[in-house]
Image (cartoon, grey):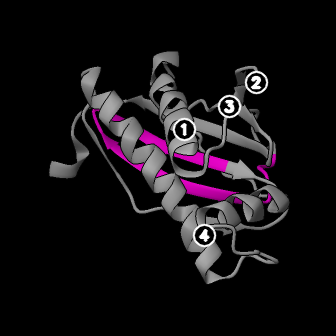
Amino acid sequence: MRVEFINPFLEAADEVLIQLIQLKTIRGRLALKMPNQPYPEICIVLGVVGKVEGQVIYGMQDDCARKIASRMMMGLPVESLDDMAKSALAELGNMVTGRASIGLESAGYPCDISPPTLITAKNITVSSPSTQILVVPLETELGIIDLHVGLEESRGDKRRR
């Protein structure tokens, strides 16, 4: 995977989080995701297709997810991730990935994104055999959001086959 594919996601996450819920991020160290290394217990998963393809996962612990959902819902207390809270988190992933796709297109990599899927479970593992996944922790006052980007340049537009 090319490192330049991750920059639009970092910029988009910074912009969306500060504009939407006044949440500043501090970027942690970029790392390569190891096979079978578990994801955090809450994951927002989106697919990407076009000149780049793969997946993006926003992972966080339950406490962080509930705090973010609460902020997105104007401070409404979130004791557990009900349907409304899950919808808010999925929309956050959609907004960040949508904005990142604009950045990818500006860099010459037009792409489309899938609707977000929210996965909640402990010790989640996601297999992506052909794509390396880069991870950047985004530290916030509400907890850490792990940005997992596994994209590669497309070998052709598979949508037209």
Above/below status of 2 relative to 116: above
The residue that appears at 24% across and 34% down in the rendered structure is 110
The residue that appears at 61% across and 45% down in the rendered structure is 22
Judge left or right: residue 118 versus residue 2. Answer: right
Residue range of the region highlighted in magenta in the rendering: 38-58
Q: Amino acid at mark 1?
A: Ala
Q: Which residue is mark 2?
A: 28
Q: Amino acid at mark 4?
A: Met
Q: Amino acid at mark 3?
A: Val
Above/below status of 129 relative to 42: above
| Label 2 residue SS | loop
Q: Earlier in the sequence, mark 3 or mark 4?
A: 4
Q: Earlier in the sequence, mark 4 or mark 2?
A: 2
| Label 4 residue SS | loop
Position of residue 56 measured from the top left corner of the image (x, y, whole percent): 53, 44
Q: Name which quarter of the figure residue 31 lies in.
A: top right
Above/below status of 59 relative to 108: below
The residue that appears at 75% across and 38% down in the rendered structure is 35
Q: Which residue is mark 4?
A: 73
- Cα separation, mark 3 vs mark 4, equals 27 Å
| Label 1 residue SS | helix
- Cα separation, mark 4 vs mark 2, equals 27 Å
Label 4 crowding class (10 Å Cα cut-off): few <14, some 14-19, many 20+? some
Position of residue 119 measured from the top left corner of the image (x, y, whole percent): 66, 66
Label 3 crowding class (10 Å Cα cut-off): few <14, some 14-19, many 20+? many
The residue that appears at 69% across and 74% down in the rendered structure is 76
Q: Amino acid at mark 2?
A: Gly
Q: Earlier in the sequence, mark 2 or mark 3?
A: 2
Label 2 crowding class (10 Å Cα cut-off): few <14, some 14-19, many 20+? few
Between residue 99 and residue 114, name the one nearer to us: 99
Q: Which residue is mark 3?
A: 135
Position of residue 27 measured from the top left corner of the image (x, y, whole percent): 70, 25
